[in-house]
Structures are given as structure tokens and as C-alpha cells.
Image (tube, helix red, strand yellow):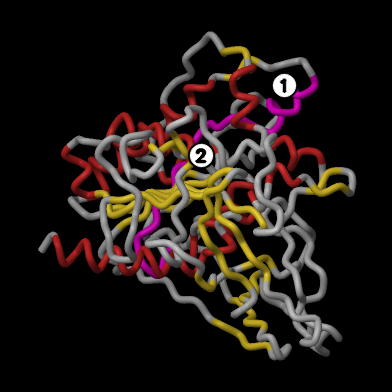
Amino acid sequence: MPRRLFLALTLIAANAAFSQAPSSPPKNDYSKSETWLCLPGNSTDACGVADLTTTIVTAQGKLKIEKWHGNANAPVDCFYVYPTVSNDPTPNSDMNAGPEERSVILHQFARFGSECKLYAPLYRQVTLTALRANMSGKPMAVDRALGYNDVLDAWNFYLEHYNKGRGVVLIGHSQGSGVLTQLIKNEIDGKPIQGRLISALLMGTNLPVPKGKDAGGAFQKIPLCRSLSQIGCVVAYASFRSNEPPPKASLFGHVPGADMMAACVNPAAPAGGSAPLHAYLGSGKGAATTLTPQAKPWVTPPPKKPIGTMFVSVPGLLSGECISDANGSYFAITVHGDPKDPRADDIPGDVVTNGVKQPVWGLHLIDANVAMGDLVALVGKQSKAYLAATK
């Protein structure tokens, strides 16, 4: 996998070493549709053009097409902040949606459109270019507050002009989860607007919570989710293969403080225990990318007609469980491959540099994909519970 993918995952560690940009760029105008990747009713934005057709690959090697349909009349909203994807040459990205930003919507957010109306602002995030420069010992002047302030402005505009009192789910991954954690802490936790929070899905991050408790760490009044119908709560996790837990050098699964731990909530079984996962994985169609690492054939021998969809679903192949042990607190993903059946026995998703797998990152690239079906179903159940509670 190209070196830029490795650098994309070093955001948490690298941020502290960046030099700070001295100026304050002008604010974005979030009344303009071009400052959003997704807005309800826009059939040409990143969500409006998303093709989420999926090929179901059974253990017997049978293929079945699964269509997807959005709900234009969904009664709740979803607000998404995407991870580090920008390849802009500047230390902070511009406000022009490139193929990277549009692609991440397809893989991490658009599928929630079956349960909620979709809002995804562009923001001037720290770029891969700045990460490369930092790693080479020549840090660029990054405005670390700029991305957060953009998302804050977008959030406030959304509340004033679009929300209209509706319940909302916050969704983020990696850098996006970090930005949302700060937003929730500063603007939502313990404030009146908390009453509209259906849930927050914070993937690929370390959310601190006191050991044995569900709140009192990053958030004081917002607990971790412990049931499929609980509302006003948080799902957070970082995924690793169950047979390759977080090593000591991992940035995920560990938080400072002897009495603290990284939160882990299994979206398929918030109360705990192992559960089958409804994954939507990249099929391998087209060139490999950050979020769609090239897969081996999903069926052997390959079918006469190759898989033509961007996504595959593999029922029964994956299960997940939140584990807390000497290795850390993490979402352990088990692959139940069977060499006797024709379906692939493993999944892509590891970070690989120069042909060598990097276990410190776990399955960070596909944190959202491994449980996407479960996350969408969870939002659906939480939304119904929220609507029932707020009639």
C-alpha cells in the first residue's frame, strides 16, 4: 500500500509536532451548497450519485444482487465528518470536493440514507501532504483549529437552518471522530441541544472513559450505548483482528491514565459479547484505494460473470466482540473462513507498507465497513426509540 496511506493514519500522533499557522482564514459560507458534500434533495452531490448496489457472496459461492434505496422522507438527520483523505498540496485542504472526499462518502456515509437525511460538510482538514512533510522532518505550518472551526460553523448553520428540531446522529471516523469528540464536548454535552442527540458513532478513535463506567471521561453527561434502542449515547471503537490485538506501539486501544480506558461498543451487540457482523466491503472492482484495498477473488474458481458492484456482503464470515485485556480495549474482528467452501477465507483491510503488514494500525482502514450494516440498523432502531420518546 502506498506510503501516503500509512501517513494518513498517523494524524493523532503527528498533530502535536506540527507548527501552527499564524493567520486566521476567512470563514466558509455554509449557506452555499458547494460547501457541503451531502445535502438532502441534491441528486448530484456525493450522496445523491452514490451507487450502493451490493453483491451478496454466500459461503457456497452463490452470488446475489442486493439493491439499496434511500429514504427521502426520513424523520431524523445524520451529520458526518470524514477522516483524513485530502491530497491537496497545502497543509490544510481547500473547500473543493475532490475524488477522495466523494469516495469516502460512498464507503462510510451514504448507506445511512436509508434511515436519515444526510448532511456532510466540507472542511479544511489537515492534509496528507502536511503529514508527509511532518514525517520527513520538514513540518508545514498547519492550522490545527481550522478544521474544527469549519465543522463548528457548519453544525451551527445546520442547527439554525436545516434541523428544525429533528433528532440527529453524529457520525465520524479517525480525524472526523476527533473533530466530533471536541464538538460534542464543547457544544452538546450537558447542554439543551443534547436532547436532540440520538447517538454519536465515533469510529477509529480512542474515546476515554473511566474503567467500569460509561461516562465521565471525554463526556460527562453522554454515556456509551448499552442497548440497541438506547438513545443519547455513544458508540466508539477501533477494530483489530482478534488474532492480532493492539501491540504496545499502537495508537488505538490505549488512552493515558491508569484509571481510564478506550471506549469500545460493539454496534451489533452494545450490551457485550460476540455477534455476527453485517459488513459491506469493497469488492475490489477498479483500482485499490485507501478504503477499498485490493481483494483476492471472493469466489474460487471465479464466477463466469465477474462481480460488477463496488461492494460485497459476506454473511456469516465475520463476527465482532469488544475485548478489554492486557493488550488494550478494542473491537476484535474474527474471520470465520472455511477452506472447504468456495468463498474467500479472509478479507482485505490491513495497512501494508512496502509489502509489510503494519499491525499497529489494525483494521483502521475498514473500521466503518466491517460493521456498516449493523451501524445502519442501529441508527434505525435508535431513531424509532427517539421518535417514540419525543412525541
Q: Nearer the viewer, residue 91 or 209?
A: 209
Residue drawn 18% across the image and 47% down it: 195
Residue drawn 49% across the image and 61% down it: 110
Q: Residues within 10 Å of mark 2 (few under 14, many from 20)?
A: many
Task: State the image coordinates of residue 59 (x, y, percent, origin top left).
Answer: 69, 86
Task: State the image coordinates of residue 77 (x, y, percent, origin top left).
Answer: 32, 56
Residue assigned mark 2: 206
165 drawn magenta: no
Instruction: List the single residue furthest toward the front.
Output: 326
The secondary structure type at the circle numbered 2 is loop
Residue assigned mark 1: 134
> In the image, is residue 188 above or below residue 227?
above
The quarter of the image holding the C terminus is bottom left
128 drawn magenta: yes
Task: State the image coordinates of residue 261 (x, y, percent, origin top left).
Answer: 47, 39
Q: CA distance from mark 2 to mark 1?
A: 22 Å
Rendered image quadrant of residue 180: top left
Q: Is residue 30 left or right of residue 238?
A: left
Tag 1: amino acid:
Asn
Q: Nearer the viewer, residue 379 or 318?
A: 318
The magenta stretch is 112-136
Q: Is residue 258 left or right of residue 308?
A: left
Task: State the image coordinates of residue 202 (x, y, percent, origin top left).
Answer: 45, 47
Residue drawn 37% across the image and 37% down it: 154
Residue 210: give its label: none
